[in-house]
Amino acid sequence: MLAQANRVVRPGDFRTAVRRGRRVSTPHTTIHVLVTSEARPSRFGFIVTKAVGGAVVRNTVRRRLRAVCRDILDSVPDGTDVVIRALPGSVDAAWATLHTEVADGLGSVMRRS
């Protein structure tokens, strides 16, 4: 589980990250990254729609993505908001695949910034 300080929870923060942040697409996710100059920990948010599956499936995908983000939390600079949109194929993706895609996607966005 991510700590409360590491979660994007307000709808306005989600909207800002999706509209103004840099985007990278992977086969199973779309990652939006907004780097700010605020002095706060990096935050992660997740969008898992009904297109992914029913409630149990969506919650499973969200938990898996949260675990991936907890693993890579130290590599994301402070003041960064990351919103990950799960695509329908993320249900069948292996853990290692999701981990690699998210880590590589974040790395590519951070290098471009």
Image (tube, rainbow, N blue to C red):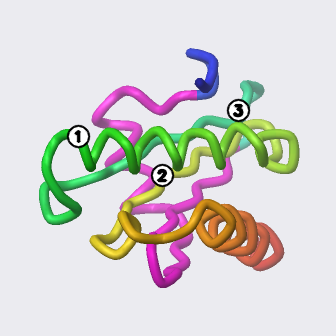
Question: Could you say which quadrant of the image residue 74 lies in?
Answer: top right
Relative image position of residue 15 (x, y in whole percent): 32, 49
Circle 2 packing at 10 Å, graded few (<14), some (14-19), many (20+), is many
Choose between 49 and 18: the one closer to the eye: 49
> Against 38, is 49 above or below?
below
Which image quadrant: the N terminus?
A: top right
Q: Which residue is mark 1?
A: 56
N-term-proximal mark, 3 vs 1:
3
Q: Which label sits on residue 113? A: none
N-term-proximal mark, 2 vs 3:
3
Q: Residue at x 15, y 65 (%)?
A: 51
Residues under numbered marks 2 and 3 in contact, where contact means CB atoms less than 8 Å apart: no
Asked if the stretch drawn in magenta spans residue 26, the answer is: yes
Over which residues does the magenta segment extend?
7-36
Question: Is 87 on the left-hand or right-hand side of 102?
Answer: left
Asked if the stretch drawn in magenta spans residue 34, the answer is: yes
